[in-house]
Image (cartoon, coloured by chain):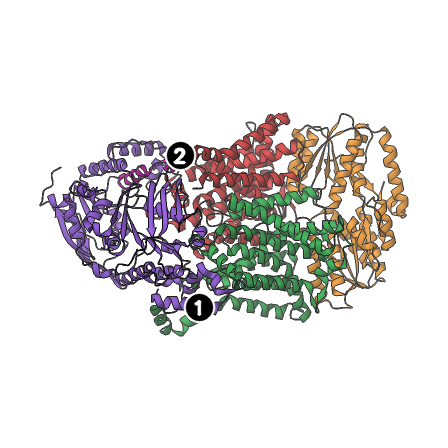
Chain colours: A purple, B orange, C red, D green
Amino acid sequence: MVNELNTPSYLQMESISKAFPGVQALDNASLSVRAAEIHGLVGENGAGKSTIIKVLAGVYSPDEGSIVIDNIEQKNHSPASVHEAGVRFIHQELNLVPHFTVAESVFMGQEISSPVGLRKRQMRSRAEDFLQQSLQYQLSGKKLIRDLGVAERKLVQIARALIDNKAKVVVFDEPTGPLASNEVEQLFRAIRGLRERGIAIVYVSHYLGEITDLCDRVTVFRNGKTVSVLAGADAENSQTIIQQMVGRDITTLYPERRRVSEKFVLSCAGLSCQPYFQGVDLNVSAGEIVGIAGLVGSGREELIDVLYGLKKATAGTVELDGQALRVNKPHIAVKNGIVLVPRDRRNAGLVLDMTVADNINLASLDEVSTFKLERKGLGRKRATALADKLDIRPKNVNAVVRYLSGGNQQKVVLAKWLATGSRLFVMDEPTIGVDIGAKVEIYQLIADLASGSNAESDGAGVIISSSDPSELLGLCDRIIVLLRGEIIAVKAVDELTLDSLLALTTGGVVATAGALH
Amino acid sequence: MNTFFKTFTGIVVGATALVASVTATAGDHLSLEGKKVGIAVVGTQHFWDREAFNGAVDTVKKLGGEVVPVDGGRDNQVHADNHDILLTNKVDAVISILGDGAVEPKFEALKNAGIPVFTVDHSSPHAVNNTTSDNYYMGTTIGRYMADSIGGKGRVAIFNAFEGALRICGIRAGLWKYVMQDYPGIEVIQPELAEAFANAPEDARKKTLDFLNQNPKGTVDAIHVGCWDQPAIGIVQALEEAGRTEIKVTALDGGPETLEIMAEENSPFVANVAQQPNVIGSTAAMNVARHFHGETLLPQTYVDVMPVNGPEEAKAVYEKLGYGTLK
Amino acid sequence: MATLNANSQSSAFNWRALTGYLPFIVFILMLGYLAVSAPQLLTTDSLDLILRQSVPTVVVCLGLAVVVIAGGDDVVAGGIDLSIPAAAVLAAAIMADQLTNHGTAFLPALSMAMGAAVIVGLVNAFLVVKVAMTPLLATLATSVATVGITKVVTSSRRINVDHPTIVSLRDNELGGLSVGVLLTLLLVLIFYFAVHRSKWGMSLQAVGGNRDAAELSGISVNRMLAQSFILASVAGGLASVFVLARGSGSSPGSEESLLLEMILATFLGAAFSPRRVVTLWGAVLGAVLVTALSIGFKSIGVNVFWTGCIKGALILLVVASAALATSKD
Amino acid sequence: MTENTQVKASSSASLKQQAVGFLKQFGFLLIIAAVFGFFSLYATNFLSSSNLLNIVEGSSILLILALGMTYIVALGGIDLSVGIAFDFGAAFAIVALKNYDLVWYLAVMVGVSGGLLVGLLNAFLVVKLSVSPFMATLGTFFIGSSVQRIFTNGGGPISHRGAPQEFRDLAVGKIAGIPSEIVIASVLLLVYFLFLEKSIFGKRIHAIGMQREAALVAGINVNRYLFWGFVIAGGTCAIGGIIGSANLRMFSPLAGYSYLLDAIAAVFIGASLSRNGRPSVSGTLIGVLFLGMIANGLNLMGLNFNTKDALEGVILVVVLMLAVYQQKSLGKS
C-alpha cells in the first residue's frame, strides 16, 4: 500500500477545544486522517484521546473547532449525522446481545427484510461472506455470540459497523484489550484488509507495540493538545512515541520515599486463577508500596480480585503477616485487614446514594455504635475528622456521595479504609478519573499509609495496580510487570525508567526488547 | 319428594333417622361393581364441598365402583374443564358437585357421549338428576328463626355478596327477604354488606367492626349471612370484641366450626340451618347406582336439612352429623 | 466483577450446559411416566383436549413473552406484565356483558373489549416508560385496578354467553382441529412473525438483550418498551375471546389461575429454548406442556392438592438450574 | 450538579417554581391529607375516635407483614411468600394448641418457627441456589399453598374454640388499656425501626439493597444478611399469622394471601415518601395506615362493594404513580 504524503485528509478535526467544569479536556487539538490509512492515536490517561473520539462521535459538542468529513463541514454534528457521514466506531465494550446469533448481531438495527419477513438466510450468508472476504475470518452465521471467543466477538462488532459498505472512517478504541496475541494478529489482518479497501482508520491503543506494528501515522496527545504527528520511521519507533507522550516533570507530584521494613505483610506463592493469570509470587513488606503494571488483559485486574476474594484462586497460597489465609470472600479479607480501593469506584467503591459519613463509616460500623445501635453524632464526628484530614469537599459529611467529584469520591473510599486501620491496602487504579490536584493529595495519603503515620506504627503494605506508568514509577518502591497472565519482571523502581517500564508492559518492540532480562 | 313434604318433617331428628335408614337399606341391593364413576368437585376448601365430595367418593367405593376424582381448586373454569378429562377417560357416569354455567356445554358433551351426569347443588337440563338440600326451606326457616330471635322487630343487616352470582344463594337470600316482608317491624339495613370469599372470617370481622362503628349500640339487632356461615365466625368475633353480643347472628350451612360457636354459652350466634353435605354426596352416588339399576329418578332429590335453633340443638346436630361431641 | 463473561472452555462448562437441560429432562421424564401410567393420554382425543384447554394460556403467554423479550428476563428489574390476565378477564367481561345483556353484535363487542384491554396496556406503558416505575410494581397495580373494574362491569356475577361465534369457537372443528385451536395457531404465527421474523422483532429482542447496544444501533428503547406493553394488552384482549369460549361465559376471578399458569409457562419455556431465553415458541410450548401435565396428573388420579407443589418445584427447578448454569464461579 | 449551582438555582427560583418544588416534596402528604379530609366529610362516623382506633387496630396485622416485606425490599428483593409465612404461623400455633395441648407461649414459639421454616426455604433458594427473590418466593408460594391444602385435606379451616384465654388475648386482649394487637404491632414496629433504621445492621442492609457490589467490597457478608433477612421476615410474618389465628381461634388456609398486595403496596408507597426512594419503617407505617384509611373510609361511605373494589384499585395505581413520580423528580434535582 502506497501512502502519498500529500494525499488530502479524509477526516479533519481542526482546533478542537472542549472544557468540562474544572478541566480543559481538549485545548486546540487536531486530528486528521487520510483515506486508506491506519492512523494511531496515543497519549497518557487523561491526555484527551477519549474526549476527541467522543467529539467525533457527536456525543460531545466541541466548544470550538471544526470537523470536516470527506470535504463536508459537519454543522449539526450528531451521532446520527456522523453515522450518515460514514464514520463507524468499534467500542471498547463489546456491545452485543449474548443470545443473538452472529448474523443477527451483524445486522442488528439494519436487518434485511422483505414483505414476508426477515431474510434470515440472506443475512446469514452476507454476514458470513463479509467476515470471510473483508475480515479474512470464517465464522458460522448461526453461532451464538455467547459461544464466541472475545476476538471473534470483536470481528462481529467490526462486521456490524461495516456491513452496509458505507463506512469511510472506522475508529477502533482499544480493540485488543482482552485479546490473546494470536487473536491480535487475526484482528490486525482484518484491519489491514480495511485499509486495502480505502477506509480511513483511527486506532486508539495503549499498546505501543501495536501502534508501531500497525499504524502508518501516529498522532500524539498530551494534556489535551496535539503535540506531534509522527510518520515514517518515527511512527515505527516506540522510543520516539514515548518521548512525545511524556514530557512533563513528574517528580514533584510524588511524595518522598520511606523506610521499608523487613517484615512481609503479604506473601503469595504460585497464585493462579485460570485462565487469567498463573504462578504469581508476590511479597509485600510493611511500609512498602508495590506497583503492579500490565495492560488490560494482562491478568492485573483479576490478580486484584483474587487477593480480595472477589474471584477464587485456582492454585497457590496466601500468607498475611506470616499466617496462611484463605481469602475467598471480601468480608474475610476485610476482617483480616486486607482492604480494596476498587477500580470501579462508582459501582464497587461507594454506595452512591448514601452520605459521605455513612460511606466512611460503612466498614467500621462497630466503632460508631453502642449495643449495635448506630451513634449518629459519633459517626459524624469521626467522619468529619477523617474528611477534614483528607480535605474532602464539600465540607459536609451529610452530602450525598453521588454528587461529589471523582477525586473527592476517591478520598471518601480511602477515608473508609483509613477508619479500619488495616494491614494491606490494595488499590486498583487509585487515581482514575481524578484531577491532578486531587491526585497529588491522594499520592501523599498513600505514602502516609505506608509510612505508618496513619496506621500502626509499623506502616501498612500497599499494592497499587495502575495503567499509568509514571504514577507507578513516582509512587512505588518495587514494580511487578504482568504480561498476558505471567510476571515478566520484578524490579526496584530505581532500575526502571518510564521508557523501560512502558516497553515492558506493552510487550516490547524490538528496539526495547533488550530491556527484558 | 317435594318441598311440602319437607316442611312437614319439622322434627329434625326424625328426618335424619329416616335418611340414615334409607342409606343403610339402599346399599344392600345397589351396586356400582365394574363401573368407573368420575367425580368432579369445584373445590375442597369449603367444608361443604369437601364433605359432599367425600360422601360421594366413599359411597361409590363402598358400592364397588372405581372413582376418578377431579378437583377444580375452587375455580369454576378449571372445574368445568375437568369434565373434559372425565370424558376422555371414558368413565361410565359423572357426579358433578357445584359449578357455574361453564359446565353446561361439558354436560351436554358428556350426555352426547352417552355418559349420564348427576349433579349436586346445580340444576342442569343435561343432568339425569340433581341432589341438593332444600334451599327454599333453608331460606324461609332461617328467616323465621332470625325474626323470632329479635322478637319480630328491629334493624337487621345482611352479608349478601353472592345472591346474584349463584342460584342457590339467590334462593336462600331471596326467600329470607320474602319472609322479612311479613315482619313490618323489621328493617333491613341498606346498603347490604358484602363478604369476600378468600379469608372470609377475617374479612367479615373487619367489615363488621366498621359496621358496628357506624351503627352504635341499640341500632342493630341482628346480622344474617345470606348464603353460608364462614363469615359468621368473624362476625361473632367482632361482636365479642366490640362488646355488642346483644346482636343476634344467623347463618346457613351448619359447618362444624359454626355449630361449635353456637353451642357456647350466651353465644350471639342463635340460629342456623345445617345441611348434610356428606349425605348429599352419598345420595348422588346412590342415584348413579339406582340409574344403572334401571330405576327412574326424579330431576331433583332433596336431602333433609336440620334447622338449628339455640345451643342445645347445635350440640345435638353436631353429634348427629358425626363431627364429634360438644361438651 | 466487571470482567467479560469470556467463553469458558473448561470441563465444568459441559456439566453446566447439562444443568441447563435439567428442567427439560425432568419434563420429558414426567410426561413419559404419565404416558405409561395413563395410556389414554396418547389418544387423539386427549391430545386435542390438551390443545383446547391450553388455548387461553397460550394467548396470554404470547403477550408476556413479548414483554419479557423486550424488557429482559430479570423478573424484578426487567420486563414483566402481571396485568395481562386481568386485562383478558376484563375484556371477556365487557364482551359477555355486551353480547348477552345488550345484544351487541360480535364485532362491536369485540372492539369494545379490545379497547378496554389496550387502555390497560397504555397505562402500563405510561407508568413504566414515563413515570419510570418498575414493570413489576406498575403492572401489579394496574392488575389490581383492572380486577376491580371488572367487578363493576359484571357486579361479580357470571355472565353466560351463547353467542354463535363464541360457541362455534368452542365446538366447531375444521379438519379435525377445533376452530379455537386453529385460530390460536394463526395468532401464534402472527406473533412469531412479528417477534422473530421482522425488523421490529429484532429490535425488540435487541432491547431486551442489551439495552445499550440497542440504543447504539439507533433503536428507541422507550418506544419499544411501550409497544411491548401495548402488544401484550392486545394479546390479553384477544385472549378474552378464548376465555369466553372456554368458559361459555365470563366468570369473576378467573384471572388468578391464568396469571400463575402464564408465568410458569413463559419462564418454563425459556428452559426449552436453545438460547435459554424467553421466546414465543418456548412460551407456547410451555403453556401446552403445563396443561398436558395438569391433565396427565389428574388422569392418573394424583391428588389435586399436589399440583401447586409440583408447579412450584418446577418453577424453582427451572430458575435454579438456569442460575447455576450461568453463574460465573 | 454541584452544590453551588443548586444553591443558585433555588435562590433565583420564582414563586411558581417554589410552589412546584413544594408540591414535589410534600405532594404525597397533601394527598393523604386530602383523602382524610374527604372521608371526614363524606364518610359517616369516619372521624369518631372509635373508628380511628378501628383503623389502627385493623391495620396491625398488615403492618406486621409489611414490616417483614420492608426488610426484604430494603435488601433489594421482594417476598411473595409473606402470606405463606402468615399461614404457617397460624397453622403451627393452632395445631400446637389443639392437637398437642401446648402452653400458649410454646404454641406461639412453634408458630413463629413455622414462619422461620418458610423463610429458611426462601433463604436457601436465594443464597445457595442464586434464584432471584421474586422467583424463589413465587415457588415457595406455590409449594406453601399446596402444602396447606394437603395438610388440611383440601383447605378446610382448623378451628379451636377452646384456645386458652392467654392465646386469645394476643389478639383481643388489652395491655395497659390498649388493644394487644396494637401493642404487639407497635413493639415490632419499634424493634424494626431500631433494627433497620438505627442499628449498624440496618445500615448494612440498606447498603446491600442500594448497591450490592459496593456493600460486598466494603466487607459486608452479603450472603449472610440475605439469608437472615428471609428467615427473620418469615418469622415476623408468622407473628402476624398467630395474631390472626388468635383473633378467630382458627386457622383458615391460604388466608395470608389477601395481605400480599397490600403489603407490597404499603412498602412501596412508604419508599416513595423517603427522600432517596428507600423503603423505610416509618414510610411503611404511613403506607399501611393510608391503605387502612382508604379501605375503612370506602366501607363507611356505603358504596356498592364492586365499586369499592374498583375504586381501591384505581386509587392504588394513582397513588403509586404519584409517589414514584414524586420520588423520581426529587432524586433528579
The residue carrying mark 1 is A380
Residue C187 spot, x, y in % from top left: 49, 37
The three-letter code of the residue at mark 2 reads Ser
The three-letter code of the residue at mark 1 reads Arg
Relative to D191, is C7 on the left or the right?
A: left
Screen quadrant of the N terminus of chain B: top right
Relative to C60, is A428 on the left or the right?
A: left
Region of the chain picked out in magenta, as a range: A142-166
10 Å crowding of disc 1: few (<14), some (14-19), many (20+): many
User: Which secondary structure, mark 1?
Assistant: helix
Instruction: Pick whichever, C198 or B65, lies toward us.
Output: B65
User: Which secondary structure, mark 2?
Assistant: loop
Residue D103 part of the magenta-drawn span: no
The residue carrying mark 2 is C10
Instruction: Pick whichever, A404 or A504, lies toward us.
Output: A504
Residue D178 spot, x, y in % from top left: 69, 68
Where residue C292 sits, quadrant-wise, is top right
Vertical arrangement, residue A196 with respect to residue B315, above or below:
above
Q: Is residue C238 visible?
A: yes
Residue B107 spot, x, y in % from top left: 69, 35
10 Å crowding of disc 2: few (<14), some (14-19), many (20+): few
Number of on-image labels = 2
